[in-house]
Image (tube, coloured by chain):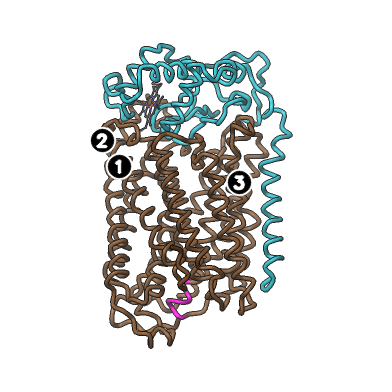
Chain colours: A brown, B cyan
């Protein structure tokens, strides 16, 4: 049942991740958005209500799609960066099964209302334990691969991958301490909750995504990364400062002033790693801007970088107490919360799949044109949703400050909730096009002959004929 | 370090530990965060001490149905929250397990909803069909809950009230 074929773990992980891209987005994202305009949409069956679907949305997208696409990419990239093979494809494929089965059980329990009640960490503790074991199996596989490496020098992506897979279990275990067994007094628990909510983004999705981008960009452009040193500055600043940020989610909350500041000051310092990554990406491509036009993968990565900067400028901005006083609890936060996971790391995830899937299946991508469609639908959809939610949030915050009645504010949000649906439809459309494209690639993409693949010549990467061939 | 994975791992985990201890564990030394208020004692009495009580069951239902994704229980010392009642104190949710502070206010804050709407019958009617009680509401109808469950949930909601704290000192640092 478990294949030991080369690349099969990466391939299976990436392909199954797509289920967890679309299903939670459609049911948990789009349908939930529709419910904010028409609350009786989908009737009132318990498992299709707002709260239940929302839990599936966050857990499915984050622990499902994003984690899987990133681990799948790591299974592909780490061996290549270290001049070896994945230590055990079988173990890798076992984690693919574990991931999908665990998520399915997780989704069903959440739909049934079986939850720990802690936002972003809703899965019950036995499932948390299961996930911890699963992650440890991933770690074993990666470390054994490192042990058998031929290439002694670590490229920066390896740094990021290795650190991320160790941070994840730490963040996960600290963030999911089961409340029934170990009661943390109210505010401490809130603090632990946001330690998890924040760091799973920063020390898992971000660092894994950055590792992918650092691998992909030089590969598809054939250009060396602008500065190795800059990439290491970025790595160490994120490693040192990120973990401090949890308390900024408690801005204006019942916590001591020093703790608020301990959360806010490092958020400002996070501009350094963000800047270093993004500068490195742009300076790498500098002078070859035509690549952005010609190559969808480059376009995805650079757009993701722009959204990454934007997300990381917004973050410190609304961790400031005066700003937070207006924007916290509003729709603004929802717009912000989508930017890094969707517009940055899902974009890098899609770009990664456009690159990797043809290479692990030996088939050319079905259509670069459709890939371009995914890009535009996703980008425009996200911008519509995010700009709408940011505007809505600002108005909502000031309306509360004005002392407006709660229901008046709810009603004034209605047009914004409608526009949000439009954005959501475009984003879901982008995902459908993406999945169709990948499925078509796997089933009927043009087979690349052995010769070209032995030559390590890349599968055709660009969407126009004019593009220059690029180095792999 | 560019060749040695163990050193890399060690240094990365070291910095992780520093930040974790500073922001997560040192706060346990703060007396303010470790002293339950009368509100907390009341909540403990109706929920924690009595897991079979209606209020405790109602609290479970609140979690199971994700009410906290649209409702906060968190009143801040800010202008936006001035109409919502007393500002929350660290000790108020001391025994809450897990906390239900929430992060989004699509609907109103519920920290002191029991003071604002003490009428259980109103809550039951509202939960079953919010639109019939508040025109234009976008709260989902909870018709699928049994009468007993609705009663429990309503019971929980009316216990969300403020108990006077004679020793309360408003922390000047806390109001900015």
Query: In the rendered view, does A105 fall on the left or right side of A375?
Result: right
Residue A320's label in the rendered image is: none
Structural distance between the alpha carbons of marks 2 and 1: 8 Å
Disc 1 is placed on an element classified as helix
Residue at the (48%, 38%) spot, across then down: A328
Disc 3 is placed on an element classified as helix
What crowding class fits label 2: few (fewer than 14 Cα within 10 Å), some (14-19), or many (20 or more)?
some
Query: In the rendered view, does A422 fall on the left or right side of A156?
Result: left
User: Nearest the camera: B79 or B71?
Assistant: B71
Query: In the rendered view, does A10 fall on the left or right side of A178?
Result: left
- Quadrant of residue A16 within the rendered picture: bottom left
Q: Is residue A270 something one can see in this rendering?
A: yes
Q: Is residue B19 above or below residue A38?
A: below
Q: Is the residue under label 1 in contact with that under label 3 (CB below 8 Å)?
A: no
Magenta stretch: includes residue A220: yes
Q: Is residue B54 above or below residue B137?
A: above
What crowding class fits label 3: few (fewer than 14 Cα within 10 Å), some (14-19), or many (20 or more)?
some
Mark 3 belongs to which subunit? Answer: A
Residue at the (30%, 32%) spot, across then down: A45
Q: In the rendering, at what x and y percent does residue A73 appear? A: 47, 66
| Residue placed under numbered mark 2 in the picture | A41
What crowding class fits label 1: few (fewer than 14 Cα within 10 Å), some (14-19), or many (20 or more)?
many
| Residue placed under numbered mark 1 in the picture | A31
Nearer-N-terminus badge (3/1): 1
Nearer-N-terminus badge (2/1): 1
The residue range painted magenta reads A216-222
Residue A173's label in the rendered image is: 3
Structural distance between the alpha carbons of marks 3 and 1: 31 Å
Q: In the rendering, at what x and y percent does residue B175 appear? A: 60, 29
Structural distance between the alpha carbons of marks 2 and 3: 37 Å
Magenta stretch: includes residue A325: no
């Amino acid at each position: 049942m478990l294949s030991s074929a080369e690349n099969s773990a990466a391939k299976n992980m990436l392909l199954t991740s797509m289920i967890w891209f679309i299903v939670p987005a459609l049911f948990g994202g789009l349908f939930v958005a529709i419910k904010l305009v028409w609350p009786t949409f989908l009737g009132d069956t318990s498992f299709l209500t707002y709260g239940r679907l929302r839990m599936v949305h966050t857990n499915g997208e984050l622990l499902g799609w994003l984690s899987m696409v990133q681990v799948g990419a790591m299974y592909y990239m780490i061996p290549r960066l270290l001049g070896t093979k994945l230590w055990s494809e079988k173990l890798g494929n076992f984690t693919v099964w574990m991931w999908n089965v665990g998520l399915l059980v997780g989704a069903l329990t959440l739909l049934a209302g079986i939850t720990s009640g802690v936002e972003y960490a809703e899965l019950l503790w036995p499932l948390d334990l299961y996930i911890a074991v699963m992650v440890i199996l991933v770690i074993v596989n990666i470390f054994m691969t490192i042990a058998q490496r031929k290439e002694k020098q670590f490229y920066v992506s390896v740094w990021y991958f290795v650190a991320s897979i160790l941070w994840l279990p730490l963040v996960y275990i600290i963030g999911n301490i089961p409340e029934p067994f170990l009661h943390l007094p109210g505010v401490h628990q809130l603090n632990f909750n946001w330690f998890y909510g924040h760091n799973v983004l920063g020390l898992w999705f971000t660092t894994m995504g950055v590792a992918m981008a650092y691998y992909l960009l030089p590969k598809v452009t054939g250009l060396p990364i602008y500065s190795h040193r800059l990439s290491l500055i970025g790595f160490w600043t994120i490693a040192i400062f990120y973990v401090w940020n949890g308390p900024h989610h408690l801005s204006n909350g019942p916590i001591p002033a020093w703790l608020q500041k301990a959360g806010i000051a490092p958020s400002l310092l996070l501009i350094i790693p963000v800047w270093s990554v993004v500068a490195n990406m742009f300076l790498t491509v500098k002078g070859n801007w035509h690549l952005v036009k010609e190559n969808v993968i480059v376009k995805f990565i650079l757009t993701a970088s722009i959204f990454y900067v934007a997300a990381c400028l917004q973050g410190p901005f609304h961790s400031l107490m005066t700003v937070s006083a207006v924007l916290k609890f509003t729709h603004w936060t929802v717009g912000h919360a989508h930017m890094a996971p969707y517009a940055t790391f899902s974009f890098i995830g899609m770009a990664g799949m456009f690159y990797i899937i043809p290479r692990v299946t030996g088939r050319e991508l079905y259509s670069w044109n459709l890939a371009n469609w995914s890009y535009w639908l996703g980008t425009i959809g996200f911008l519509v949703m995010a700009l709408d939610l940011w505007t809505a949030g600002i108005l909502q915050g000031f309306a509360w400050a004005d002392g407006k009645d709660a229901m008046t504010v709810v009603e004034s949000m209605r047009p914004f909730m409608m526009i949000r649906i439009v954005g959501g439809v475009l984003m879901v459309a982008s995902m459908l096009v993406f999945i169709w494209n990948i499925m078509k690639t796997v089933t009927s993409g043009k087979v690349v002959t052995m010769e070209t693949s032995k030559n390590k010549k890349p599968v055709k990467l660009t969407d126009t004929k004019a593009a220059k061939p690029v180095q792999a | 370090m560019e060749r040695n994975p163990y050193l890399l791992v060690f240094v990365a985990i070291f910095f992780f530990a520093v930040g974790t201890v500073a922001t997560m564990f040192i706060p346990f030394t703060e007396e303010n965060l470790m002293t339950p208020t009368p509100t907390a004692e009341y909540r403990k009495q109706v929920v924690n001490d009595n897991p079979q009580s209606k209020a405790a069951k109602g609290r479970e239902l609140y979690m199971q149905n994700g009410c906290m994704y649209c409702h906060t229980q968190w009143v801040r010392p800010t202008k936006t929250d001035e109409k919502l009642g007393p500002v929350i104190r660290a000790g108020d949710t001391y025994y809450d397990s897990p906390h239900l502070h929430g992060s989004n206010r699509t609907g109103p804050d519920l920290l002191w909803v029991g003071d604002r709407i003490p009428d259980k019958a109103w809550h039951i009617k509202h939960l079953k069909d919010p639109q019939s009680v508040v025109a234009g509401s976008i709260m989902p109808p909870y018709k699928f809950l049994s009468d007993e469950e609705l009663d429990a949930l309503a019971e929980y909601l009316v216990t969300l009230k403020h108990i006077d704290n004679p020793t309360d000192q408003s922390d000047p640092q806390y109001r900015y």
